[in-house]
Image (tube, rainbow, N blue to C red):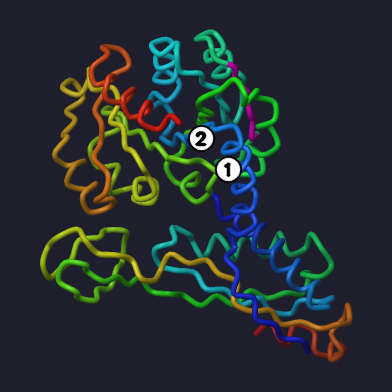
Amino acid sequence: MVDIVVMRAVTSDNQAHADKVRAMLDEKNVIGLNIISSPGAGKTTLLERTIVDNPDLRFGVIEGDVFTGRDASRIEAAGAPSIQLNTEGACHLTANMIETVLPRLRLDELDFVVVENIGNLICPAAFALGEHRRVVLLSTPEGSDKVQKYPHAFNTADLVLVTKTDVAGAVGFELSIVLEDLKAVNPKVEPLLLSAVSGEGLDRWYGWLRSLRR
Amino acid sequence: MHEFSLTADLLKVSREEARKAGILRLDRIFVRIGKLSGISIDAIEFAFRFLREEEEITRGAELVVERIPGKGRCTSCGRDVELEHLFLLCPDCGTATVEITQGREFLIVSLEGGSEAEPAEKAGEAGGNHG
């Protein structure tokens, strides 16, 4: 019988890949963002608008989806290079997936690599991708109680964006509940409110992005 | 269900560490899973029964889970608090300044196994060490 003490985190294997991704980005002075939300919260729409409104910021996008290349096509049409990752069933991206496809983006020509994770507020939260910042979106039609229902995603966020503020009134969204829950789940984060349709609040989001640029 | 990939990683790391130590047959894998880790222990155990079959070294392995409660300390009033969820409000002073001190972990603590592919006492005792 052999008995050995290990004391190693299960995530250490994913973390090793995440560290490699981070090193590849750092070497080229590129900022990595990991965007997490439920399906339909407006990740791709926000990215499209962000790319169009900020021609001086050079974005490369890795699109995670279970199926289809729709989102990568939308990003390309907005004017940024993109890579589509299809997980064919898997509910989140892992760092080794990013490590594999990252060399296909020309990092020399980019300021940001944005990873749009699989639409899911649970699983992606558990996997670091080597990002510098994690951005979690909550759209107003999803309801005001999602921070409390999915605390892990919001707890690990560096920035929370409340999207689709243009329809907030129509769907009965109550911001005070989100603010209260966020204070308990992730007190360090102050959410930004915006709409990629009306343009409300986008300046602060762009300002945040610019503050990261090296 | 991210527990499937976490279990795959758990087995990968365990096999790696076992081989480094000259273990050819893993009998027991001891892990700690924290209350605040966002991990379903049932789902991990379910995935483990499938994924251990992928390689000979883990085929007879049993997973032993130690459940770690969530704990934190309020940085405002200094009180130690039990945490059932990722809600960092101090029940004493009401401020959201509780820092988590334990409960987020998913840790491989230790491994038990043998340097032969088959357990020596296997004959006549099939299933005996699986409780």
Instruction: Compare residues A141 and A109 and report the one nearer the observer.
Output: A109
> In terms of image quadrants, where is residue B93?
bottom left
Amino acid type, residue under disc 1 in the picture? Arg
Q: How far apart are marks 1 and 2 (CA)?
A: 8 Å
Q: Is residue A144 found left or right of B55 in the rendered image?
A: left
At x 32%, y 72%, the residue is B71
Dot placed on the residue nearer the N-terminal end, 1 or 2: 1
Q: Main secondary structure of the magenta part?
A: strand
Where is residue B116 shown, x and y percent of the image? 89, 82
Q: Residue A32 carries which label?
A: 2
Amino acid type, residue under disc 2 in the picture? Gly
At x 13%, y 39%, the residue is A176
Q: Is residue A149 found left or right of A80 in the rendered image?
A: left
Residue named by callout 1: A22
Compared to residue B44, the image places residue A176 above or below, namely above
At x 39%, y 23%, the residue is A42
Q: Give the range drawn in magenta.
A: A81-87
Instruction: Report the chain holding disc 1.
Output: A
At x 21%, y 49%, the residue is A183
Where is residue A209 shown, x and y percent of the image? 38, 28
Compared to residue B59, the image places residue A4 above or below, namely below
Q: For numbered disc 2, what is the local secondary structure?
A: strand
